Image (spheres, rainbow, N blue to C red):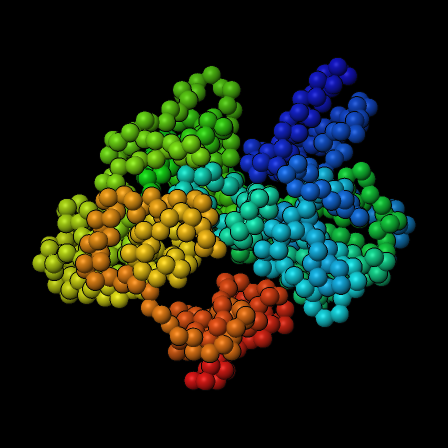
Amino acid sequence: MNKREAEERVAELRGLLDKANQAYYQEAQPFMSDKEFDEKLKELEKLEEEFDLHDPESPTKRVGGEVSSVFETVQHPVPLLSLDNTYNEEELNDFDGRVKKILEHENYDYMVELKFDGAAIRLRYENGALVLGATRGDGEKGDDITTNVKTIRDIPLQLKGESPAVVEVRGEAYMEREAFARMNERREEEGLNVFANPRNSTAGSLKMQDPKAVAQRPIRFFAFDLLLDDEENALTQFEKAEKLQELGLPVSEYHKVCSNINEVHTVINEWGELRHELPYETDGVVIKVNQSDLREQLGTTSKFPRWAIAFKFEAEQATTTINDITLQVGRLGTITPVAELEAVELAGTTVKRASLHNEDEIQRKDIRIGDTVVVEKAGEIIPQVISVVNPDRADRNEPYKFPENCPACNSELIKYDDEVAWRCVNPTCPPQVRIRIEHFASRDAMDIEGLGESVVDQLVSAELISTYADLYDLKKEQIIELERMADKSAQNLIDAIEKSKAQPFERVIYALGIRFVGKTVAKDLAKAFKTMDTLQSVSEEELEAVDSIGPRIAESVVKFFKNEKNQAIVKRLGEHGLQFEKEEEEQASNIFNGKKFVLTGSLPTYTRKEATDLIEKHGGKTASSVSSNTDYVLAGESAGSKLDKAKELGVEILDEATFREMIGE
């Protein structure tokens, strides 16, 4: 390669990597895998060095992110640098060699930590109080996202014990895999763009303008570094982790001191296997010189510290063929394209299908039937198509054309202005009817035991029901005619349908399947408006006056109850005797006022719901995860990581007997 060719390739790589950085950091919609990005970055770095083509604006010289014009910009007192990274042991040994060469001794060890696939943020505490939360931005300055950061439950607003006057904390915001998967399912159902992975969903959430919306995202946090003015030089990295925990900040249990690089390799191998069992995404291991007082001597490049490196795990990907693209119809009419794949083994499971999310996603990646594609599990849960192999080949099929009609009922599809998804708005569309009835009967809604997918399918196919209100007209002699339905099971189903009439008002609201109305919103609606008659007549303004309800939910609720078919169904449910009024419950006591509980394990006599109800009756609230803001953990048999987390944070742990004593039972 001559210099002219090198200049052309450098310009090409810089443009591509700048676009990739923009997509990854600002738009939270990456189009390139981490490994591909790193390989192209290394190629660029090599060409710049070999042909003396240096540029301070090159992606090789800058941290990937940028500050936003939407948020106020803050200057970081100490730059938040990226980490150099490697995928192989030899380069890790080279890193160790460079450390030895610069220090000219071996009187140091390494702190090894899991590398979380999230978004780096900076916290500042003054006199123990949280006063600032900021993004990494370009490393020198970031966005002030303090209001959003304060909605993350893992982050304490006040440090524990006596803290220094100023405490600077570095950490990673992230999402657990299952929470991420559930959030994407809801977004897809609502016609919104789904996030490619937990990292992008976290980064996108932190940049939202509405803190209430941020609070509804399942963001977690781990702290990994601490700056205490001049004091940090006296603490090793391991001691910093201990100090962070003392101050009430969450720290991952996976950190270990290694006396040499061989021990580091052992830990990497162990954690490479362990990562599949963790509830969150980790894309590697961070290795830091443990002695903070050596960092100044080791120094930094323009982009990376020389005292730390990241060893990245290989992403679990596979190559396969798209045999077809089919369409799924969701409960609210959302049309989701699905890639039907040649079966392939991926992360221990056989993958045959992968969601393509929406038409825009197919066009952006130019995915066509017959293509050979790279598939990966997003968050190691959801298979997704990453890219097309050899998209320039001559024998490709024509671009996929999204149909104009519903695949189930042939109704014309529509797309709302603010959505990316196509929808079928025919209320009698068979898949929608089935899914709405399944939702109505689900455990968190009316909890009708025995009314699963296959039974609903038979009832709809036999034209015995077409709405969930029809369930309450069913007779035993009709049900007994269904396949594999004996006399006893038919009677059990009739009994379960009858029993569901006692479900409380908030469950009835949730069961209706109103768009954007989940369990929490349903509970808030029941509490605010008390009766179905009132709820059906409220305005959008009255709905928005409720704390948890924004314009989208308000509009959806009003639109649902204005629909004549919905009105008729709701009227029939009332005539069948469902609970259309919230029972006023007297608070038994205020002993738990302002207290937050987390439940874990199986209690001897209480169910999870019974224990939750008792906590609320005595003024308390429950949360799903343990943080420094948790007051009590109520633990039973087989309590898992939540119990360990409570012990780590010093949260008071109660067994059922102690809990009973506290509430006077």
| Residue 70: quadrant of the picture | top right
The number of callouts visible is 0
Describe residue 313's horizontal placement relative to residue 616 as left or right.
right
Can residue 483 be seen by looking at this rendering? yes
Give the position of the N terminus as an image quadrant: top right
Q: Tell me which residue sits at (72%, 71%) in the image.
A: 161
Of residue 476 and residue 664, the one placed in the foreground of this image is 664
Residue 610, image x and y in percent?
Answer: 39, 72
Describe residue 344's horizontal placement relative to residue 581 as left or right.
right
Residue 253, image x and y in percent?
Answer: 64, 62
Can residue 643 be seen by looking at this rendering? no
Q: Tell me which residue sits at (21%, 62%) in the image.
A: 577
Of residue 534 and residue 180, the one placed in the foreground of this image is 534
| Residue 403: quadrant of the picture | top left
Q: Tell me which residue sits at (51%, 31%) in the image.
A: 387
Residue 130, image x and y in percent?
Answer: 69, 58
Residue 663, image x and y in percent?
Answer: 47, 81
Q: Tell me which residue sits at (49%, 29%) in the image.
A: 365
| Residue 23: quadrant of the picture | top right
The extreme right residue here reads 104
Describe residue 435's horizontal placement relative to residue 401 as left or right.
left
Give the position of the C terminus as an image quadrant: bottom left
Of residue 319 and residue 173, the one placed in the foreground of this image is 173
- Relative to 371, does residue 433 appear above or below in the rendering? below
The extreme left residue here reads 477
